[in-house]
Amino acid sequence: KPAHPIEVKFGAITKPNRTDPAMAAFRNYGLGQFIHWGLYAIPGNEWNGVSARSGAPASEWIRKWEGSTVPTNWIETYDNLYKQFNPKNFDAKQWARRAKEMGAKYVIFTTKHHDGFCLWPSKYSDYTIANSPYKKDIVKQVVDAYTEQGIDVFLYFSVEEWNNKDYVKNIPKTPDEIARFDRFLKYTRNQLLELQTNYPKIKGFWFDGTWDPSWINAYAFTYNLEKELRNNNPNLIIGSRFRNDEYESRHFDSNGVLLGDYEQGWERKMPADMELLGGNDWDCVMTIPPNGWGYIKNTDGMYLKTTNDIIDLLMKSRAMNGNFVLNFGPDQNGNMSKHENELITALGKWTKTNAEAIYDVKNFPLESKYGYYTLSKTDPTSLFLTVINRPVDGILRLTFPRNAKLVPASAALLDHERDLLLKKANIGLDRDTNTYFDIIVPENLKTKRAFVIKIKLNTPT
Ligand code: FHN
């Protein structure tokens, strides 16, 4: 934040921390599902059986891959993949049922990624699902199926388009570039209004590909467009990636004010602490492999995050008032992978048992070396401790400030609904500042997962 605020004309349109029901619901989602699906599912991270890049390739970026193993006519090949896109097993209802089982309360679905292929029959483009052998509107099926399951839908939309002749990467300079980019901006507006009109049930947009100088330079246009989208739907939720101010500041304006309703910069990374978040709403979006959002045929040698990894990240997010969004990359037929399916089932079991600690909770201003605290929003005497690190001696020693208005009074395991022994521990340490409470973890508690302890708080006796 600058020491002296400067005048920003194209800054935030909405106030930070909106209090309307739509944003209140957003804050309580807890867990979300991201789905990256498009033509990149066909090659599935390899050209002719060879992964062209070492390290952590982004499978949905395959059209951009370079190197000796990429076929010479690869861009043309890619741009013709739509002629093969015919997902015979795609069943939006099944996806939605499984997402619900997993415990997801919102879904972010790719309507169009950087390759420009639209999964809805846009009247403003020929490069759409309508011209594939599949023909049917995929976005509509996803919006309807998820909404029916009570899962809110956000549409992912990439502004950047690799194969659009009107797209200009740098600030348009020549008359031709200016005319082309002008057409591109109109096209983008048309598509967004079309999505709003076609799918009025959506709760928000999740923007991407907004980093090129041309888009950054179009701050007046994007400001007006955001206003227009919000006028059409005052409850619409838009993250901080959509646009920048007139000084090229992205996510936050030049005075440090969030540009949008929640911070959208936490991609494959987590805030180290609450301070970094400045009290803004946020979500963390995460891949299961190290990188790669679209389908990956062969994951040999890649670390795939486990259910325990996900539980850890989910509860870390919740402890810091954020949502955690797990990405899935279905294959060209619309199937999730074996690992993804196993994750859904295992995570679903966990979120069901421990729902009280995940949804409708907020940060509790103490840290625990055992895991993460979350506090019920509706009952400030219900505190949850997700134990990730189980102590070797079975004693969870909670440290509370001496002057705390509420302290632990009783404890129970959420999964077994079993009461646990809780006692004040006069350990003779820092007695002027801290009070200690011991919770005993039963030796016969056999679990491969983190477990949650519900702690009832009471005024100190
Ligand atoms: O380039 C994309 C990437 O392919 C993926 O869609 C992610 C999802 O957050 N967003 C972009 C990188 O920031």
Image: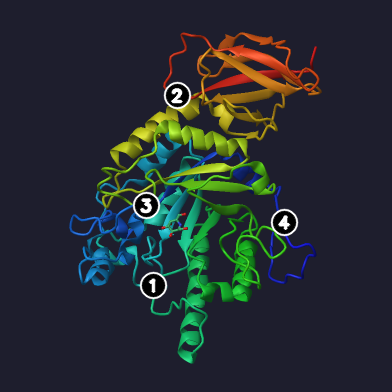
Q: Label 1 vs label 3: CA separation?
A: 26 Å
For this orientation, the residue located farthest to the front is: 429
Residue at position x 63%, y 40% from top? 321
Please provide percent x and percent y for residue 132. 27, 64
Q: Earlier in the sequence, mark 1 or mark 3?
A: 1
Total marks shown come to 4
Q: Which residue is mark 1?
A: 125
Amino acid bearing label 1 = Ser
Label located before the other in sequence (2 or 4) = 4
Query: Which comes before the other along the chain, label 4 or label 3?
Result: 4
Give the CA separation, mark 4 to mark 3: 34 Å
CB atoms of marks 2 and 1 within 8 Å: no
Dot 4 corresponds to which residue? 15
Q: Secondary structure at mark 2?
A: loop
Real-space Cα separation, disc 2 to disc 4, in angstroms: 40 Å
Q: Earlier in the sequence, mark 1 or mark 4?
A: 4
Question: Quarter-wise, where is residue 304 in the image?
Answer: top left
Which residue has dot 2 on it? 449
Q: Which residue is mark 3?
A: 292
Residue type (three-letter) at the residue carrying disc 2: Arg
Q: Secondary structure at mark 3?
A: loop
Badge 2 crowding class, 10 Å Cα cut-off, few under 14, some 14 to 19, many 20 or more, is: some
Cβ of mark 1 under 8 A from ligand 1: no
